Amino acid sequence: MSGLVPHIVQYQGSKRILAPQILSHMPFFFERLIEPFAGMAAITIATAKKGRAKEYIINDINGPLVEVLRYAIENPSELVKCYSEVWNEQFSYEGGSVEHYYKIRDEFNKGNQSPANMLYLIARCVKGSVRYGNNGQFNQSPDKRRNGTSPKTLKANVDEISYYLKGRVKFLSMDYREVLENAQHGDIVYMDPPYQGVSYVRDSRYYSAIDFNDFVETIERLNRRGIDFLISYDGKCGDKQYGKDLPKELGLKKVMLNAGLSSQSILLGKREGTYEALYLSKGLQQYANDLESKKEEQYSLFDSAAV
C-alpha cells in the first residue's frame, strides 16, 4: 500500500492533500473521530490509515454520498461490480459517453440514486465538482476530456480504504447539529462545513448550506461541553480572503495551512498561494502546548546530560 492517503475518486473540496497538516494538530491516539460534513471522508480515511482512532462516525446530509462511503468501506466488491456495469456502459451507448452521462444523471434525479450511479456522476463530472440546483437536483456537467475513474483504479482504492475502516464506522445522514449532540469526551470532531463563498450561489456545489449564526451557536455548545474539535473554514488566495473569520469570542486558535499554488491564478499568470484556515478548540490548543512543554523538557534533559 502506498504512503499517500487513498481516496475513492477525485472530489472537489477534499482535504486529502491537507490531511497530514490537519492530523498534526490532533492527538496521536483518541477514541473516536466524528466528521459531520464528511464529503468523501478524506480526514477519516487519513486518520484510519495512521491508526489514530478506535472508531469513526461519518455523516453527511447528502444521503446518496454516504451510501457510496458505506459500500466502499463495508462492501467494496459490490460497489466495484455495480460501478463497473455503469462505467462500461458509456462505451457502447448509442449516443456516446457524454449522452450516457446525461442519461445516468436523469435517472439519478428521477430517483435511482444507487451508490453506483452517485459514484459514476462524481467520477465523470467536471473536476469532481458535485453541484446541485435550487430544486435539489444534481446538475453538474460531464467532463468531456475523460471517462472517469476506471474500475481497476477504483478497486485498488476502495480495497485499501475498506482494510482500514471496515467494521469501525457508524454511517449517518442527518443535520450536523444532531450528530454533534452525541459527541462525548474523548472524541475529536473534524468539521469542514460548506464554505461561505459558495453556499448560496445559484448552482451550489453543496447539497445543503448552513447558517453562519447557527454554526457559531453550535461551536459555543461544544465549547461549553468541553468537546475537542477542528474546523476547516475558508481561507485566502493571494490578497483575497474567502468568507469572514469565526468570532474571536469562541476562543479558537486560527492556523493557516498551505494548500499550494492556486490553479486558477496559474492560468492567469499570477502564481498565487492558497491557504486554508484551520481553527482549533481550546482543548486542542492546550494539548499542543503540553506537547511543546514535554519537548522542551526533553531537550533540557538532553542538554544537561551532554554537559
Image (spheres, rainbow, N blue to C red):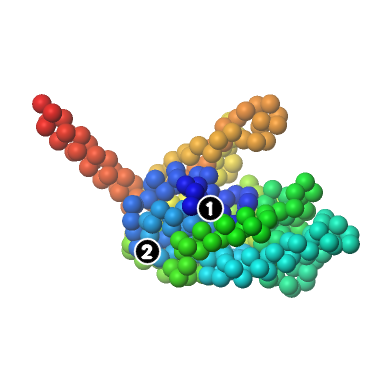
Residue on which the image places disc 2: 54
Q: Tell me if 253 is positioned left or right of 38 in this view.
A: left
- Secondary structure of the residue carrying tag 2 is strand
In the picture, which quadrant includes the C terminus?
Answer: top left
The amino acid type found where label 1 is placed reads: Pro
Residue 257 visible in the current orientation: yes
13 lies above or below 94: above
Q: Nearer the viewer, residue 33 or 156?
A: 156
For the point 77% across and 53% down, the residue is: 142
- Secondary structure of the residue carrying tag 1 is loop
Q: CA distance from mark 1 to mark 2?
A: 19 Å
For the point 56% across and 54% down, the residue is: 7
Q: Nearer the viewer, residue 124 or 254?
A: 124
For the point 62% across and 55% down, the residue is: 153
**As drawn, which residue projects farthest toward the bottom?**
111
Dot 1 or dot 2: first in sequence order is 1
Residue on which the image places disc 1: 6
Q: Nearer the viewer, residue 144 or 137?
A: 144
Observer-side mark, 1 or 2, equals 1
- Report x, y in % for residue 208: 63, 61
Quarter of image, res 71:
bottom right
Q: Tell me if 225 is positioned left or right of 116 in this view.
A: left
